[in-house]
Amino acid sequence: MTSGGLDLSTTTVLLLVVAGFTAGWIDAVVGGGGLVQLPALLLVPGISPVQALATNKLAGIMGTSVAAVTFYRRVGPDLRTAAPMAVCAFGGAVGGAALASRIPAELFTPIILVVLIGVAVWTVARPALGTTSRLRWEGNRHRVTAAAVGLAIGAYDGLLGPGTGTFLVISLVGLLGYAFLPASAIAKIVNFATNAGALVFFVPHGAVLWTLGLVVGAANLCGGYLGARMAVARGSGFVRGVFIVVVSVLIVRLAWQVLAG
C-alpha cells in the first residue's frame, strides 16, 4: 500500500490494523489507546513525527465518533458537562497542534509520568472511587471547572496525545465526581472534539496520510464500537479495572522512555 509517498508492506499494514483495533477498544472503554496506536505509526519507515501524530488523529476520530454515539444512545452522558468541556477542548487542541512541531516531547514525559503514578496510587487506594456519581459542584462552578479541564487536556492532546482519554476520565471521576461509566461516556465526546481540533490544524498543513489513516481508522472504529458496548454492558467496575491496567501500562512505557532517554 502507498500513502503520502510511503510504500508500506502488507505485514506493516496488518500490524497497524491490529494496533488500530486494540487502540479503539481501549479508547472506548477508558481512553489511552494512543499509547498503542501512535507508537505503532511512529515505526512506519519514513514517517515523520508530525505525520504520525496527524494520522493518529484521523484514525482516532473515527473510533471516538462511533464510541461517542454508542455511549450517547445507551448511557445518556451529561451534556451540561460534555458541551463546555468539548468546546474548550476543541480550542485547546487547535493550539496544542500548532505547537506540536516546536516543543520537544521530552520536556513533558517526566511530568506526565509523576502525575500518572499519583493517579494510579490514588485510584487503587480508594476502591470506592468512581462507583457512583456524586457531583461536587452544581451550576456555573461545575461548568467552569469542566471547561478548564477540557481546555488543558485538549491542548495536551493536540500537542502529544497518548493518555488523553485516561486524563479525561480521571478528571471527571476525581475532580467532578462522576462514576467511571458516565465519565467514560463524557470523555468520548470530549475526545472527539480534541481530535477534530487537532485535525483543523493538521489537514491544511498536509500532515495527514489519508490512505493509511482511513485504513487504521476503520480498525479503530470496529474496536471502539466493541469496547463501548462492553463498557456499557459491564458497568463502572469493569471500566475501573481497565483504567488501572491502562494507567499501569502507560506508567511502564513512560518510565522506560525516561530511563532510555
Image: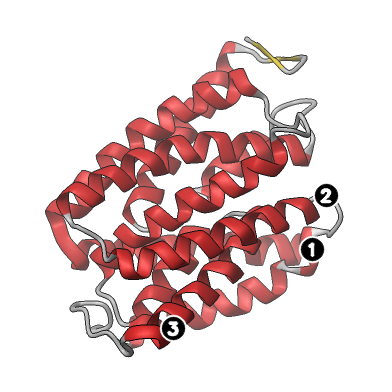
For this view, does 62 lie left or right of residue 56? left
Check contact, mark 2 vs mark 1: CB within 8 A. no
Q: Which mark is residue 248?
A: none
Q: Residue at x 23, y 85 (%)?
A: 134
Q: Residue at x 40, y 84 (%)?
A: 140
The one nearer the camera, 187 or 43, is 187
Give the image location of residue 229, x and y in percent: 20, 45
Q: Secondary structure at mark 1?
A: helix
What kind of residue is marked 2?
Ser
Is residue 42 something one can see in this rendering?
no
Is residue 136 something one can see in this rendering?
yes
Quadrant where the N terminus sits is top right
Residue identified by numbered label 1: 106
Residue identified by numbered label 2: 101
For this view, does 252 lie left or right of residue 221? right
Tell me if residue 130 comes above or below residue 260 in the rendering.
below
